[in-house]
Amino acid sequence: MLRQLALLAALAAPLTSALAQAENSAPSQGFLCCNMRTDGKWISDINYAESGTRLIPAGTPVKVTGFGRHRVLVEIEGSKQAIGNDYSRTMDLNTFASRYVTAQDPKAKLNGYPKKVREAIEAGRLQPGMTREQVLMSVGYPVSSENPQLDAKVWRFWRSSFAEFQVVFGDDGRVKEVVADPATRNLVVAE
């Protein structure tokens, strides 16, 4: 029995240490980095636009209330929710939390963009010529399991589990094209 308890303690130590580190250095409040979808309790990093989800706009105030296993516990618009690290587990929880909860309100930058870019971002859509930052605000971060480098020429996203789209960047770092089947393209590209 003593040996089993020691084994359990040894297995729990890395998780406890990671959670303590995250709790000590993650922002306690800030703003949602980007448009994210919620079912009212769960916001997944994959950001599927499924039936029953609604869009929470970039810049919405967020308060971090704690951490769980692969999740950042938050309060948004008076509602307790979790931002789930479902597909970006290649990064530690603190880095993940800092990605989605930012100290600076992205609305300040959003307000300075041209009208068509602002409208596309507010609708959660993309358009050619957008910068990487504008893509992030509009559709969220690409999951790190499929996109380990944010400076890559192509970012892979999913509108749903069967609707992939790829954002292709030109040498100037701006969206050159969005590659997807016609139905998905109509949902993600502002024309």
Image (cartoon, rainbow, N blue to C red):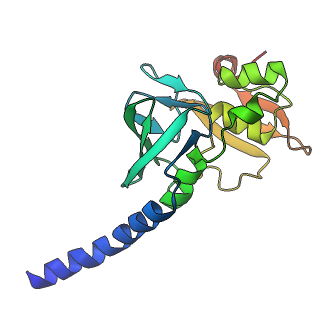
**Viewer-closest of 161 and 7:** 7
**Viewer-closest of 117 and 52:** 117
Q: Residue at x 29, y 71 (%)?
A: 12
The x and y percentages for residue 26 are 51, 57
- Give the total of numbered labels: 0
Judge whether 157 appears above or below 55 on screen. below
Residue most toward the bottom? Answer: 3
Task: Locate residue 138 relative to residue 15 in the image: left or right.
Answer: right
The x and y percentages for residue 145 are 57, 52
**Viewer-closest of 3 and 61:** 61
Q: Quadrant of residue 159?
A: top right
Q: Residue at x 22, y 74 (%)?
A: 8
Task: Locate residue 185 relative to residue 158 in the image: left or right.
Answer: right
The answer to whether residue 125 is seen in the rendering is no
Task: Locate residue 25 relative to residue 171 in the image: left or right.
Answer: left
Q: Quadrant of the N terminus?
A: bottom left
Q: Quadrant of the C terminus?
A: top right
Judge whether 154 appears above or below 4 on screen. above
Q: Residue at x 64, y 22 (%)?
A: 184
